[in-house]
Structures are given as C-alpha cells and as structure tokens.
Image (tube, rainbow, N blue to C red):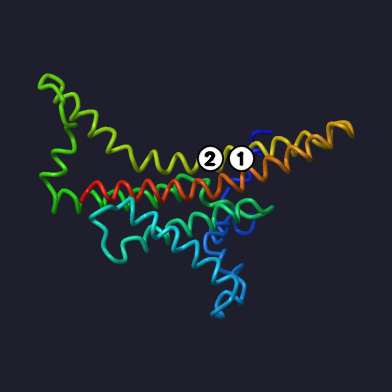
Amino acid sequence: MMANLFSVFEPSTNWLNLSLNWFSTIMGILFIPMSFWLIPSRWNFNWNKIILTLHYEFKNLMGNHFYKGNTLMMISLFTFILMNNMLGMFPYIFTSTSHLSMTLSLALPMWITLMIYGWLNNSNHMFTHLIPQGTPMILIPFMVLIETISNSIRPMTLSVRLTANMIAGHLLLTLLGNTGPSSTMFIYILIILSQILLLTLEFAVAIIQSYVFSVLSTLYSSEVN
C-alpha cells in the first residue's frame, strides 16, 4: 500500500527504468498558448501585470540596495516554481518540486552565492549581523552560534517547506482517491466533494509556496547588502 501511495513521486518510468519524468520540469513551456507571443494579447497583458506587481513587491523588499535587473532573477524563480507546482496538480504529470533534489538545487546554489558575495564585499555587515543590537556580553558567543546555525539551515528550510507542502497535498488526494471504490454512494459523493475542495486548496498552495520561496530568497539577498 505504501509503495503504491508514494509511487506518484517516483521519477523513473517503466521504459528502460529511465528518469524521464523529470522532463515535466520544462514541459510547462509547451502549454503557453501561441497568443501569448502576439503583442498585444490578453495573455501577455495579464502576465505583464503579474510581473510588474512582483517587480514592485520585490523592489520594496530589497529597499535602498535595489539595482536594475535584481528582481528579474526572483521573478524567474517564482515563474519556474509556479509552473512546476501547477503542472503537478494535473493527473499523470510528475511534480518535480515534491523532491528535495529539485528544491535543494534551487535554494542551495543561491544561498552559497549570496554568502560568498556578502562575506567578500560586506564582511563587517555580515559579522555585525551575527550579533543583534543590545545583546549582553555574556550572551554574545551563544548568539553567534545560534545565528550561524539559523543562517546555515536556510537553504534546507526553503527546500523542505516547498517539498513538504507539495507532498502533503498529493498524499491527501491519493488517500481520498484510494478509499472511494470501497465506499457507499453517499460516502463516494462526499469524497468527490472533498477532493474538489482539496484540489482548489492545492492550487492556492501552489501559488502561495512559489511566492513564499521567492519572497524569502529576496529577503535573504537584501540581508547581505
């Protein structure tokens, strides 16, 4: 039962045991309608409004250390995660963001890059960031240790948060679907209604988690300046 339950997260397929399911990571490009590339079009207009909203949001988070083009990376990160989260809501499509190997490969290189940039260019600021203002002298070694640990686990918390949220929703949908055939008609209708509500919630979670990932990444980048 558990092997079948978690088989939806298996990246390999039955053809030569290859991990062809990872192709779903870039498969979202095929779903972009042709009218999107025709300017002006309704698809392009709506997406430009979303991009501008995200641009102003990330610009405010970066504060006085904003430079032109800085928000482009975070908007691209948001778009990539959102595309994979949304594709995972459809049947028989592999959800790449439900694997730590995928989310950690997004969070870890970005965190390492920010740390290298911060310690090379703003060493004094990085040192002072380890000790909150007003800390008693006796607590300074402990605060340095705590801040170092909390800073070091940031890429893990980013990746685990996204992975856990995507796995939880898929598992609930799978569990409800497995109990349907052996139930009565009344329970069967309740399960269908519950799945519809849960699927709607999962679409919201897919959007929220991609936004949270990009916002936290923006906040981490603003701290190194």
* For residue 131, side relative to residue 2 (left or right): left
Residue under the point 46% across and 44% down: 100
The x, y position of residue 115, in whole percent, is: 23, 48
Badge 1 density bin: few <14, some 14–19, many ≥20, Cα 10 Å: some
How far apart are the alpha carbons under marks 2 and 1?
7 Å
Compare residues 119 and 175 and report the one nearer the observer: 119
Residue under the point 16% across and 32% down: 131
In terms of image quadrants, where is residue 56? Answer: bottom left
Q: Could you say whether the residue bearing mark 1 is in a helix, strand or loop?
A: helix
Q: Is residue 54 above or below residue 165?
A: below
Q: Circles 2 and 1: CB distance less than 8 Å?
A: yes
Identified by mark 1, the residue type is Gly
Identified by mark 2, the residue type is Asn
Residue under the point 53% across and 46% down: 98
The x, y position of residue 71, in whole percent, is: 35, 60
Quadrant occupied by the N terminus: top right
Q: Could you say whether the residue bearing mark 2 is in a helix, strand or loop?
A: helix
Q: Is residue 69 above or below residue 63?
A: below
In terms of image quadrants, where is residue 72? Answer: bottom left
* For residue 16, side relative to residue 107 (left or right): right
Badge 2 density bin: few <14, some 14–19, many ≥20, Cα 10 Å: some
- Looking at the rendered structure, the number of numbered marks drawn on it comes to 2
Compare residues 136 and 167 and report the one nearer the observer: 136
| Residue matched to label 2 | 165
The x, y position of residue 171, in whole percent, is: 63, 38
The x, y position of residue 133, in whole percent, is: 16, 31
* For residue 37, side relative to residue 192 (left or right): left
Residue under the point 54% across and 80% down: 39
| Residue matched to label 1 | 169
Q: What residue occupies the far right of the structure in this picture? A: 185
